[in-house]
Amino acid sequence: MTTLHYSILINAGRTTVWTTMLEDRTYREWTRPFRDGCYYEGSWKKGSEIRFLAPTDDGGEAGMFSRIKENIPHQFISIEHIGLIMNGEVDTTSDEVKKWTPSFENYTFTDLGSGTELKVDMQIEDEYVTMMNDTWPNALKVLKKLCEKPGA
């Protein structure tokens, strides 16, 4: 397991960055670099279950089954990934899943000058490091553009 770190300075306040990152409509936009059609079901409330889903090439859907470990509004959110989802079926007990669970994905929002520094720290299986290093920077650029758009 590897821990990856990403950050970006966004010329908008923490509330704007937080809301844009987590609101359903804009979440679907900034996560497109990972896979077109990404969405979530559930709540960002501490202790809540949340499912991160995307369509698969065969017409189904797959994703992560997770829990919100911590939520300090406009400052920090921690997602604990605890399983996989394939076509509606949750797997938290297979040997494949047990190799990497639990793993965490954390977002930290910090005031920096007139903007917000967003830090992403995530634990990932080594085989996905290259894909994440290619994708996260692009996703963060989309998020930055959404947050800095007039009227955001």
Image (spheres, grey):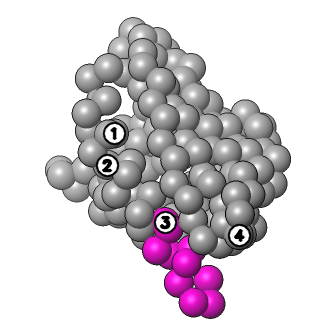
Instruction: Say if 56 sits above or below 105 in the image.
Output: below
Label 3 packing within 10 angstroms: few (<14), some (14-19), many (20+) = many
Which badge, 4 or 3, is on the more N-terminal residue? 4
Tag 2: amino acid? Thr
Q: At numbered mark 1, what does the secondary structure look like: helix, strand or loop?
A: helix
Left or right of residue 17, residue 130 in this image: left
Tag 1: amino acid? Met
Asked if residue 46 can be seen in this view, the reply is yes
| Frontmost residue, 4 versus 58 | 4
| Frontmost residue, 9 versus 133 | 9
Residue to which mark 4 is pinned: 114
Q: Which mark is residue 132?
A: 1
Return the x and y of residue 127 as percentages of the image width and height. Answer: 26, 23
Which badge, 4 or 2, is on the more N-terminal residue? 4
Mark nearest the camera among 4 and 3 is 4
Label 4 packing within 10 angstroms: few (<14), some (14-19), many (20+) = few
Question: How far is the residue under mark 3 from the one under mark 1?
Answer: 16 Å
Region rendered in magenta: 143-152
Tags 2 and 1 in contact by the CB under 8 Å rule? yes
Tag 3: amino acid? Leu
Q: At numbered mark 4, what does the secondary structure look like: helix, strand or loop?
A: loop
Which badge, 3 or 1, is on the more N-terminal residue? 1
Residue to which mark 2 is pinned: 135
Q: Which mark is residue 143?
A: 3
Tags 4 and 2 in contact by the CB under 8 Å rule? no
Left or right of residue 6, residue 128 in this image: left
Tags 3 and 1 in contact by the CB under 8 Å rule? no
